[in-house]
Image (cartoon, helix red, strand yellow):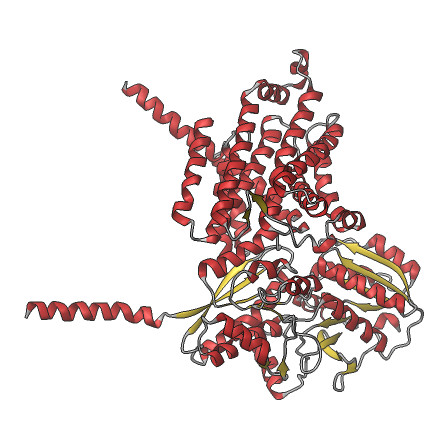
């Protein structure tokens, strides 16, 4: 897990050497890192903890708006604002998680998706406008993250890329540590049999709330980072396109197979870009690809990678 | 001798290889439009105009002797990072010499394309886009808006609604608009204008794209019995379903669709069923009879190519390409973006209906030779009944009282 993650991020870290001068490609790499974290968080809550949360995009958008508003209205430097945004999103995540504790399966999906559905009218409506969301027009001016006087604006894509890389690695390490810790075991136990794990003293209340808090914190923080990078926000992010794309990342990467979601982000974003000139055929081909992958690679790309390495090690063992 | 032969061969081969390279030299034109998602209909309208312009220029020998090559980019649903990606791809990577968009991000596009130099033409119709421009007119001097703002367009709709030769049975209006920047801009302005004129805004609803079930809203409308219902949601299925459900038990209300009349699918799907609905198009090419012979030739050509009357945005987008091409010709170098932009903002462009002049915010304000057109569906097609400003009837085309109001 850790080695594969190191290879993926190591490979990505080298990319600016080849494409550092091409803003368009650097932007794609930055978005791969951002979506990689969001998809990994979704994978943690859905793939590992078995909670069918459909609120991940909503948490991302909440984080983005929270950070922008906190920075714009209260003058908090963006580098701190993204952590504040993470905290706000985590608090909302816990609030959403509370009713979900009494629900299972599709009902959790319904409640969490309701957050997604409610968010858009809230941000566009009078309450949203009152807190500074800009209503339907969105927020068109968001200051960039500044560290020691250097502004990480879209004009400095390589610098932004490495800052995003640091953030993505930190988030991924946290996710990895959680999966490998007692928490991760508890998540899996609750996913496999909640009653049995409860009889062993695993508290569903504690761990389910914890996973809601953690994944929404990380997602909100990355959302905040996104807002300061792009410099503008609108509720367009709540369109079904991003939601579906993130889900495709999970399926392609392999649900419940960290760091598959990061691989899924790389494959999906790249494919999406390559298919972009095909217009209306893009979603069609992408959808077809998902069907094929689900049928032939149920564990996603990561399953293929693992099979390849396991096969190799078996051959090496046989040779020995 | 051997050396000479090999030299000749080398030169010949190099020459042969160079010929296609020279012949293939093109000017790249960026076209970021919605090719998928909720805005595909409008994206298609813009593309039809842009394609005609590019084909015309290429057929007449190209621009400065070079052929134009369109590079398309799917802006999908204008998520901020997608708008930025379009700018980085087209201007930063492909290095196009002009960009021709339609709806493009309502201000996000100004920031994204403003950091490059290539002339950028958009049809945002949005005050927020103009506000961004006004923050730094020098930096954003390459941004040109092909239509007037939402506020001014809504004011025009209001003026024409009150100028219709029709006696309203009461002073009650219902406004339904999409919950996007365009919809709220128009809806809020209309509400303000109607209230100032002493009308009662009996209902003002914001609805999301994708609304197809209008029962609850129509129940309230049937109780209110408004004189005017204004619907502003630029997507065919929404406005078609509204009309059909409204017609199950219609009230005697003028149905004003504003800019929602523009997706081609509206009149194409409903045909004569839609007769009576009114709507508006900024930077309009009046149809079915155009105001000048040149404009009529353009309308006929459009209809010949696409087999239907021009829709909103087609002519505006076409004119954007032509205005840029005229400026490039005058400057003599498509790469001198600053000079091309300066030429456009200083000299404007002489189009089929007359002169296009951009204001100090590089906005094509309504009026003069390029007014806002107000249409009514008559006999299954869009017929211009008014132009504005100033609000005046267009030629001999008359407003017809809708059948459900009689």
B334 relative position to A251: left or right:
left
Q: Quadrant of residue A53?
A: top right
Image x and y of residue A60, in percent: 64, 41
Residue A50's place in the image compared with B94, above or below, is above
Residue A142's place in the image compared with A35, above or below, is below
Nearer to me, B181 or B23: B181
Count of labels in the image: 0
Residue B367 in view? yes
Image x and y of residue A72, in percent: 69, 48
Nearer to me, A65 or B317: A65
Residue found at the far left of this picture: B1
Residue B323 in view? no
Residue found at the far bottom of this picture: B293
A135 relative position to B173: left or right:
left
Nearer to me, B227 or B249: B227
Image x and y of residue B306, in percent: 57, 73
Image x and y of residue B47, in percent: 56, 67
Residue A9's place in the image compared with A184, above or below, is below
Residue found at the far top of this picture: A200
Q: Residue at x 72, y 73 (%)?
A: B380
Q: Quadrant of residue B156?
A: bottom right
Q: Quadrant of the N terminus of chain B?
A: bottom left
Q: Quadrant of the C terminus of chain B?
A: bottom right
């Amino acid at each position: 897990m850790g080695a594969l993650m190191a290879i993926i991020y190591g490979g990505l870290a080298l990319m600016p050497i080849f494409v550092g001068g091409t803003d368009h490609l650097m932007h794609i790499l930055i978005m791969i890192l951002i979506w990689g974290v969001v998809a990994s968080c979704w994978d943690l809550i859905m793939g590992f903890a078995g909670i069918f949360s459909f609120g991940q995009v909503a948490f991302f958008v909440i984080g983005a708006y929270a950070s922008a508003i906190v920075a714009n209205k209260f003058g908090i430097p963006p580098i701190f604002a993204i952590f504040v945004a993470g905290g706000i999103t985590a608090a909302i995540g816990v609030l959403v998680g509370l009713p979900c504790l009494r629900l299972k399966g599709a009902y959790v999906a319904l409640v969490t998706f309701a957050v997604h559905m409610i968010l858009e009218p809230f941000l566009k409506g009078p309450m949203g406008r009152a807190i500074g969301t800009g209503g339907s027009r969105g927020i068109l001016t968001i200051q960039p993250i500044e560290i020691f006087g250097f502004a990480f604006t879209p004009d400095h894509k390589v610098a932004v890329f490495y800052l995003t890389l640091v953030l993505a690695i930190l988030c991924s390490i946290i996710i990895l540590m959680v999966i490998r810790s007692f928490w991760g075991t508890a998540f899996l136990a609750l996913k496999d049999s909640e009653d049995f794990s409860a009889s062993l003293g695993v508290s569903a209340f504690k761990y389910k709330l914890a996973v809601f808090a953690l994944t929404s914190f990380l997602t909100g923080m990355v959302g905040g980072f996104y807002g300061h990078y792009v410099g503008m926000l609108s509720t367009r992010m709540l369109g079904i396109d991003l939601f579906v794309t993130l889900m495709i990342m999970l399926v392609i990467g392999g649900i419940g197979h960290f760091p598959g979601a990061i691989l899924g982000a790389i494959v999906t974003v790249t494919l999406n870009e390559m298919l972009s000139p095909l217009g209306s055929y893009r979603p069609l081909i992408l959808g077809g690809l998902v069907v094929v992958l689900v049928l032939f690679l149920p564990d996603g790309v990561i399953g293929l990678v693992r099979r390849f390495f396991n096969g190799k090690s078996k051959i090496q063992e046989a040779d020995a | 001798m051997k050396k000479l032969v090999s030299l000749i061969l080398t030169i010949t081969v190099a020459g042969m290889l160079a010929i296609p390279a020279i012949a293939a030299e093109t000017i790249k034109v960026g076209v970021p439009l919605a090719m998928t998602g909720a805005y595909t209909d409008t994206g298609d309208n813009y593309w039809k105009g842009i394609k005609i312009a590019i084909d015309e220029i290429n057929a007449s020998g190209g621009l400065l002797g070079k052929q134009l090559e369109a590079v398309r980019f799917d802006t999908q649903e204008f998520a901020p990072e997608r708008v930025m990606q379009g700018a980085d791809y087209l201007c930063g990577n492909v290095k196009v010499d002009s960009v021709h968009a339609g709806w493009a991000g309502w201000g996000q596009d100004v920031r994204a394309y403003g950091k490059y130099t290539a002339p950028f033409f958009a049809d945002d119709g949005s005050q927020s886009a103009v506000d961004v421009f006004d923050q730094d007119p020098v930096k954003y001097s390459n941004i040109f808006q092909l239509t007037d703002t939402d506020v001014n367009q809504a004011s025009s709709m209001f003026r024409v609604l009150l100028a219709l030769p029709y006696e309203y049975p009461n002073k009650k209006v219902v406004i339904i608009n999409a919950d996007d920047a365009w919809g709220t801009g128009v809806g809020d302005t209309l509400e303000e204008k109607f209230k100032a004129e002493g009308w009662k805004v009996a209902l003002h609803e914001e609805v999301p794209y994708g609304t197809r079930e209008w029962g609850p809203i129509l129940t309230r409308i049937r109780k209110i019995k408004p004189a005017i219902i204004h619907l502003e949601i630029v997507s065919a299925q929404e406005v078609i379903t509204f009309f059909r459900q409204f017609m199950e038990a219609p009230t005697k209300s003028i149905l004003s669709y504003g800019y929602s009349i523009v997706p081609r699918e509206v009149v194409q799907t409903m045909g004569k069923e839609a007769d009576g609905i009114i709507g508006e198009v900024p930077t309009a090419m009046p149809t079915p009879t155009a105001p000048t012979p040149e404009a009529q030739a353009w309308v006929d050509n459009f209809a010949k190519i696409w087999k239907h009357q021009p829709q909103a945005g087609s002519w505006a987008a076409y004119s954007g390409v032509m205005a840029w091409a005229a400026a490039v010709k005058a400057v003599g170098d498509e790469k001198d973006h600053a000079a091309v932009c300066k030429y456009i903002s200083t000299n404007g462009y002489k189009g089929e209906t007359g002169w296009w002049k951009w204001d100090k915010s590089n906005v094509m304000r309504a009026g003069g030779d390029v007014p806002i057109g107000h249409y009514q569906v008559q006999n299954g097609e869009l017929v211009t009944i008014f132009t504005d400003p100033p609000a005046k009837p267009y030629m001999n085309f008359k407003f017809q009282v809708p059948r459900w109001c009689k």
